[in-house]
Image (cartoon, helix red, strand yellow):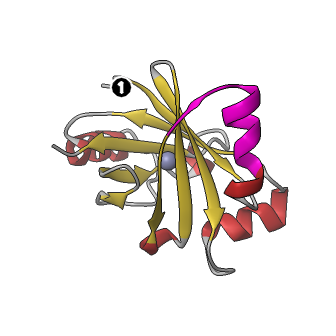
Amino acid sequence: MIKKVDHIGIAVKSIEQALPFYTEVLKLHLLGMEEVESQKVKVAFLKAGETKLELLEPTDDSSPIFKFIEKRGEGIHHVALGVDSIQARIDEIKEKGIQMINHEPKPGAGNALVAFMHPKSTGSVLFELCEKKG
Ligand code: ZN
């Protein structure tokens, strides 16, 4: 069902300030940056071998990432699991009694469809299902 860990999401106050650690100290390759309007975040993807790190910076204080940083500080925000047929995976997970935040996939960063599971159902880990389009 799960192909791999597609990426790990890390909440930061400022991508500009956080980036040199990733690119200069860890020497990870910056794959790209984009803004995800619906989530009010700016994201930067870094290639880390077979997986990626996704830095998430809030663009607005109504962003879920802004609220996360307020509450818990910067740090690991979510683990994204790569899947095919995301709607079928969502339905399967719900059949097992796991609560989803998103019952239908929505457009996410990196030209992907994404859906989050509710951390109440997953031992407090925020898991994202993520299917690459095209
Ligand atoms: Zn993500």
Amino acid on which the number 1 mark rests in the picture: Ile
User: Looking at the image, which is closer to me, 6 or 1?
Assistant: 6
Q: Residue at x 66, y 26 (%)?
A: 27
Q: Residue furthest left?
A: 134
Quadrant for residue 103, please give it: bottom left
Residue 5 position, x and y percent, is 47, 27
- Drawn side of residue 66 relative to residue 105, left or right: right
- Drawn side of residue 54 relative to residue 105, left or right: right
Give the residue number, with chain letter if any, for mark 1: 2
**Which residues make up the magenta segment?**
18-30
Residue 26 among those drawn in magenta: yes
Quadrant for residue 62, please give it: bottom right
Q: Residue at x 51, y 32 (%)?
A: 52
Q: Residue furthest front?
A: 24
Q: Residue at x 38, y 38 (%)?
A: 96
User: Looking at the image, which is closer to me, 28 or 10?
Assistant: 28
Mark 1 neighbour class, 10 Å CA radius: few under 14, some 14 to 19, many 20 or more: few
Q: Quadrant of the C terminus?
A: top left
| Count of picture labels | 1
- Drawn side of residue 79 relative to residue 35, left or right: right
**Picture layout, residue 121 above or below residue 43:** above
Q: Quadrant of the N terminus?
A: top left
Residue 127 position, x and y percent, is 52, 42
